[in-house]
Image: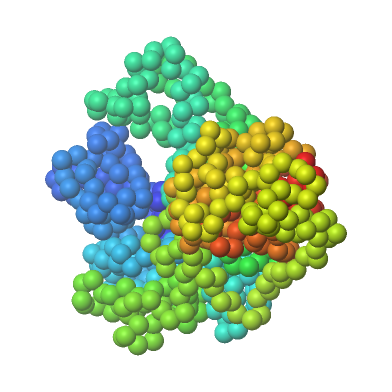
């Protein structure tokens, strides 16, 4: 039995061959373990791939596509004057790999080919990959393997790293074009299940290259602004050649900075070479890397696990070599990640360690596009399973869709229920917080305010000024016109005295890494005093379902442990709050039970662990300084 695994990546493709029970080995194509996934359309209609394509690109870059996988949703590529289907471009890459493997096997094809793909690829994208495999001339059985499952199987294949049933591994996959975060659990039958996954389509090694290119441009562009603009927006073949060479030099400099503290980027005339340091590169990409770590945290929370519950965090993808990646994961999640092998080859090698029966989640059926030849969908045991999802496939509570396009940056909202996990996977307990004496005082004041709102007494018993105007649930069903600070009347009722306290500096200039999205509704931000790295958001949403989903997602962001909850009441409103603290941030949400109003109190990941509030401390802060009708200022 000869099995070939192919990891067709955004920038590079890796092939691994296992023959008749022998250990899998990486196949060298054109003398290297990694073959560029690039294609070049010759004027005679031929498609060159790999290093041949890169060499020809210097002659006419307009006929060159370095990353066809990143264009999978475009259907076609314009290379020079030729329109090439994306599936044909991908087929050319697979065909080159198959040709080399067939040569090494003495002219015969492998019995089975395993193709890896991102876990979030839906039926349409997988159908393109399957079509490309058929166009490449693969005659053996074809098995589709989700990349995080392959990565987990590779991790578990090392001595001392086997995953027992019930254990889970987080996979941090930073490739050239995308970032993927997944939590994979080991099942009782020796297989793997994807508990949660999410991704960023706008973050990868190519984006790091672009950031470094922009940085270099700031250093030299003033010398000849017009020449620099021609490099950025080439108009002639000579300009395109110069830009291509510069991009390759920038990429090489990035890779060198993973090994050395500084390096030089060769520049075309009239510019002088630029010295760049690792510190400069890390400063450029730190915000982007923080997004990836935050997404990893949210994915862990979606799987109902903490970093400490994991068997490890496994780094795969060539761009995970950046030293900053490991240090930020350690800093923010409290776990030192593992990189047990060449990160570029981990997925292809791991595909060999996955049994077909073990791929039982996230490998959904793809019909045979050609209608001929053996076709096997991993996990399918009968023809009926060859189309449509495999039973038990899950919907990520963060993405809101069973599969399909990645969520690009920020949050993706869904009211989808949390997945039902196997009973042997640990889950977070929710602790019902005991109400303090202070809370009872709040409840008493709240009751008096309610009476005042009903017209009973009209004034507070102690002769204080009239309380804030109260609104009915019907009046708060949709946001009204906000006032000068951004508050609707209903939001002002929720904020209480906070809205006008100078120390809180409330306005509608919303900021921060975790600010609510503009399309959610009316938003106001206040600055909570004596709370390092603190933000206080008030939201009047247009949709109660979207607000509930946002509350769930923001509460899952810290990837923390125990969650404390309790009821609250004040200013004629009542609801429930929940607080959680993770390794890098703390979050408390307080909702109103019968109207689309929400408050979010949080501490950003930039805060040192010593300054983070525990869930109980954050709840105390809320009760004393934020809750409507509180007795303290």
Residue 340 position (above or below residue 81): below
Image quadrant in which the N terminus is located = bottom left
Relative vertical location of residue 193 with respect to residue 59 in this rendering, above or below:
below
Q: Is residue 102 visible?
A: no
Q: Quadrant of residue 442?
A: bottom right
Q: Quadrant of residue 404?
A: bottom left
Side of 56 relative to 180 (left or right): left
Relative image position of residue 552 (x, y in whole percent): 57, 61
Q: Is residue 72 visible?
A: yes
Q: For this rendering, which residue is in front, 409 or 16?
A: 409
Taking the image as shown, residue 538 lies to the left or right of residue 60, namely right
Nearest the viewer among 524 and 108 is 524
Residue 346 lies, in percent from the top left, at: 53, 60
Tell me what residue is drawn at x 31 percent, y 54 percent: 72
Given the current orientation, which residue lies at the most extreme right position? 437
In-image side of 163 versus 413 (left or right): right
Q: Position of residue 80 (x, y in %)?
A: 19, 39
| Depth order, front residue of 182/407 | 407
Residue visible at 47% across and 17% down? 220
Q: Residue at x 26, y 58 (%)?
A: 87
Relative placement, left or right, of 22 versus 5 is right
- Which residue is the extreme one toward the bottom? 382
The colour scheme of the drawn protein is: rainbow
User: Residue 125, how many percent across, how many down?
Assistant: 33, 62
Residue displayed at 57% across by 84% down: 189
101 and 300: which is toward the camera = 300
């Amino acid at each position: 039995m000869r099995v070939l695994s192919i990891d067709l990546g955004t920038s590079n493709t890796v092939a691994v061959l296992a023959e008749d029970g022998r250990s899998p080995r990486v196949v060298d194509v054109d003398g290297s373990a990694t073959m560029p996934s690039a294609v070049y359309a010759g004027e005679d209609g031929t498609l060159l791939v790999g290093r041949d394509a890169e060499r020809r690109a210097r002659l006419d870059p307009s006929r060159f596509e370095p990353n066809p996988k990143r264009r999978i949703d475009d259907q076609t590529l314009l290379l020079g004057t030729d329109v090439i289907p994306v599936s044909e471009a991908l087929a050319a890459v697979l065909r080159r790999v198959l040709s080399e493997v067939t040569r090494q096997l003495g002219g015969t094809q492998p019995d089975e080919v395993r193709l890896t793909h991102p876990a979030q690829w839906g039926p349409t994208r997988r159908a393109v990959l399957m079509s490309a495999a058929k166009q490449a001339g693969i005659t053996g059985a074809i098995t589709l393997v989700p990349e995080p499952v392959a990565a987990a199987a590779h991790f578990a294949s090392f001595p001392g790293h086997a995953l027992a049933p019930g254990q889970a591994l987080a996979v941090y996959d930073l490739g050239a074009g995308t970032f993927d975060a997944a939590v994979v659990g080991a099942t009782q039958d020796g297989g793997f299940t994807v508990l949660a996954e999410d991704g960023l389509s706008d973050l990868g090694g190519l984006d790091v290259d672009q950031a470094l290119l922009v940085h270099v441009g700031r250093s030299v562009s003033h010398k000849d602004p017009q020449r620099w603009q021609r490099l950025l927006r080439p108009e002639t073949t000579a300009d395109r050649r110069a830009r291509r060479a510069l991009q390759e030099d920038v990429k090489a400099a990035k890779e060198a900075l993973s090994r050395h503290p500084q390096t030089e980027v060769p520049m075309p005339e009239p510019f002088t070479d630029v010295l760049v340091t690792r510190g400069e590169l890390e400063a450029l990409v730190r915000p982007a890397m923080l997004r990836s770590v935050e997404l990893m945290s949210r994915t862990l929370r979606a799987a109902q696990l903490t970093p400490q519950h994991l068997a490890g965090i496994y780094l795969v993808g060539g761009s995970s070599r950046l030293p900053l990646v490991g240090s930020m994961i350690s800093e923010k999640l409290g776990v030192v990640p593992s990189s047990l092998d060449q990160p570029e080859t981990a997925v292809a090698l791991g595909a060999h360690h996955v049994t077909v029966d073990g791929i039982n989640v996230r490998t959904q059926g793809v019909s045979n596009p050609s209608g001929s030849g053996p076709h096997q969908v991993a996990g399918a045991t009968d023809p009926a399973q060859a189309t449509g999802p495999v039973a038990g496939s899950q919907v990520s509570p963060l993405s809101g869709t069973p599969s399909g396009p990645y969520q690009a940056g920020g949050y993706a909202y869904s009211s989808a229920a949390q997945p039902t996990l196997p009973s042997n996977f640990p889950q977070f307990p929710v602790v019902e917080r005991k109400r303090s004496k202070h809370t009872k005082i709040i409840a008493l004041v709240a009751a008096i305010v309610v009476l005042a709102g009903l017209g009973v007494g009209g004034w507070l018993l102690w002769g204080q000024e009239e309380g804030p105007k109260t609104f009915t649930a019907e009046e708060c069903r949709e946001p009204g016109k906000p006032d000068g600070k951004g508050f609707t009347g209903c939001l002002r009722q929720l904020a209480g005295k906070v809205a006008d306290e100078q120390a809180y500096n409330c306005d509608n200039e919303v900021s921060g890494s975790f600010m609510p999205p503009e399309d959610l509704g009316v938003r106001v931000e206040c600055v909570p005093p004596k709370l390092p790295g603190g933000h206080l958001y008030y939201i009047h949403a247009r949709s109660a379902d979207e607000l509930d989903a946002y509350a769930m997602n923001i509460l899952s962001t810290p990837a923390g442990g125990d969650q404390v909850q309790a009821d609250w009441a004040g200013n004629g409103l009542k609801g429930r709050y929940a607080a959680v603290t993770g390794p890098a941030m703390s979050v408390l949400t307080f909702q109103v039970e019968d109207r689309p109003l929400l408050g979010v109190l949080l501490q950003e990941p930039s805060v040192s662990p010593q300054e983070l509030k525990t869930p109980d401390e954050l709840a105390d802060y809320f009760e004393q300084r934020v809750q409507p009708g509180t007795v303290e200022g």
